[in-house]
Image (spheres, rainbow, N blue to C red):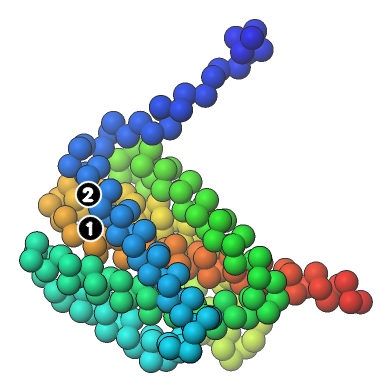
Amino acid sequence: MDALLGRRPINIKALFDFSKIDDVTKKHLKNVYASLAISTFAAAAGAALHLFTGILRGGFLTSLGGLGFMLALGLTANEPKNQLKRLGYLVGFALCTGLGLGPLLEHVIAIEPSIISTAFLATTLIFVCFSFAALWAEERSYLYLGGSLMSGLSIMCFMGLMNLFFRSTMIYQLHLYGGLLIFCGFILYDTQLIIEKKRNGDGDFIWHSVDLFLDFINIFRRILVILSNKEEQRKRKNKD
């Protein structure tokens, strides 16, 4: 029937065919994504601590704590004897990152609690799709995005700083949506960069997972803001 209709059956195995990637690199990627999963759960725990307990609250001190954990991770040698210690630093950094998301999550919950789950599912879908695109693509094809992405990120930082003074809605929207596109591009770039680093002898999967974790968090934060802004606008229209 499919042949008569001119359709081809979907080859599920082809979706997971990463034969271009050697076995050693595949094992490294598994460790990277396992570390990413651990850091994501730690961030969720940090956000929960802020929202549901009075033990820890997101703020300036947690930002300093996150920076301290990041420095400790970067300065600790990547050796087997230090692996658990470095993983602990990663969890500490992710926990502080989740605490830092707490105030934004409180604001979103006040508008519409379901936005959080929607934003998380959307972020996960975006992350998975762009990760697969990077893994399927030709070798190094997205590494050339690096210069453009860094330039775009610099422009976004400048726009954010400039808008502290001008308070322009247009600049705010450009910063918000432009940042979302840039961090989607970083998923492609960072994934292929991790593969290239491993092939050049860099097997620090814990540090490599940090790049992907930051991509995930930055996309999640922007989707939260976009959805909450739209929900606020919808409620205002309904009142009018």
Q: Nearer the viewer, residue 125 or 6?
A: 125
In the rendered structure, the answer to whether residue 149 lies left or right of residue 204 reads right
Report the amino acid beneath label 2: His
> As displayed, is residue 224 above or below residue 188?
below
Report the amino acid beneath label 1: Phe
Which quadrant of the figure has residue 69? bottom left
Residue visible at 66% across and 70% down? 113
Q: CA distance from mark 1 to mark 2?
A: 7 Å
Mark closer to the chain start, 1 or 2: 2
Q: Nearer the viewer, residue 176 or 76?
A: 76
Residue visible at 28% across and 33% down? 20
Residue 194 image point, x, y percent: 27, 53
Report the residue marked by disc 2: 28
Residue 149 image point, x, y percent: 42, 62
Residue visible at 36% across and 54% down? 189
Dot 2, how many residues are within 10 Å of its Cα: few (below 14), some (14-19), or many (20+)?
many
Report the residue marked by disc 1: 205
